[in-house]
Amino acid sequence: NPQLHLLLSNMEEVVISLNQHAVIEPKVMGFTGYPVPKGGVDCITRSFFRKTKSIINSQYTNSRQVSERVQLEQGSYVLLPTTFEPGEEAAFTLRVYSAKPIKLKLVDTTPSLVKPAVTQSRSALESKSIQQYQAVFMQVADEHRTVNAFQLHELLEACLPNDYIKSCASLDICRQVILTMDTSGTGRLSFSNFKELLVSLKAWQAVFRSHTKERSGILKAERLRDALVDAGFALSTSVVSILVLRYMRKDGTLRFGDFVSAVLHLSVAFNLFDKRDPLDNGTVKLSLNDWLHSALTC
């Protein structure tokens, strides 16, 4: 849901008005408001709402407009317009009326890499369990002991333990893996890369399952953002929306293979940007050729 930051320089009585644009079959809508600690203007996570009590609570109705008049102390607040039913979408306009100047802005996350998504083995036991696949790897590898996307596809089909995890063993995902993990530019992976992939898949599976309902193996689209944060990516609403459009299925959910594909795309995108932004300025300048190369690599 969108989050709007309201800043009051003085105690003020305000009128908050939420208008939905739909005339036919309007949604049941309303809004809530929460006090925000000083300096807390970044996108607020689910844990904040679990711990913080709302101080603004409108009624929820399917009328065109929902309004609430409230007296607020000086400080910062976050306003959260929502539909009553989860998973619904609706166009809206939120206005705040006051006798004195106030500040209202949309709160969003600045994209950042929280931690590397591709991980290495963290224990001798884990490394030993993966070592058993070396013989299978060498059977399909070339004389340089490397594999391409097609051979990687065969390997994952043979090595992944069940159909649930094998959903990420498609040829398209194998091509993404090559683009993500191949540092030599040959389009091939070594056994060391393959071990990193298996360890990473295990970590991504744990993240995915922790955000699925009753660990069912099906991730609701609205939980994708939190899952990606745990995988290592803090993303803006617009970026998450693109990922949802790209990977969400007809029933509004994602499978594990979809999640892995999103993680791989993001890994490549962040790596490409970091290489072109050595001073960490947050901006890069690209020629058309560089842009096409980067876009097609992602």
Image (spheres, helix red, strand yellow):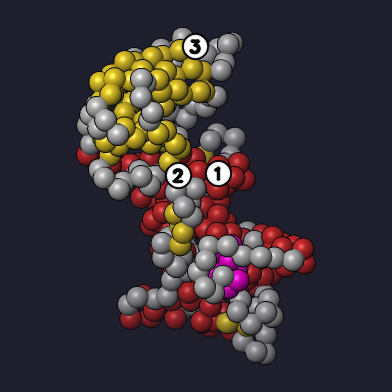
Q: Which residue is mark 2?
A: 108
Above-or-below relation of 242 to 171: above
Q: CA distance from mark 1 to mark 3?
A: 26 Å
Q: Secondary structure at mark 2?
A: loop
Q: Quadrant of the N terminus?
A: top left
Q: Nearer the viewer, residue 7 or 247?
A: 7
Q: What residue span does the magenta drawing correspond to?
A: 267-276
Query: Percent x, y for residue 98?
Result: 37, 21
| Residue 280 left/right relative to 214 | right
Q: Residue at x 48, y 76 (%)?
A: 195
Given the image, on which type of amino acid does mark 2 rest? Asp
Labels 2 & 1 near each other (Cβ < 8 A): yes
Which is nearer the eye, 28 or 176? 28
Read off the residue under disc 3. Answer: 64
Which residue is pictured at 51% across the width and 18% down the height?
20
- Examine the residues drawn in magenta and state their main secondary structure: helix
Which dot, 2 or 1, sits closer to the camera? 2
Question: What residue is disc 1 on?
Answer: 238
C-alpha span from label 3 to label 2: 26 Å
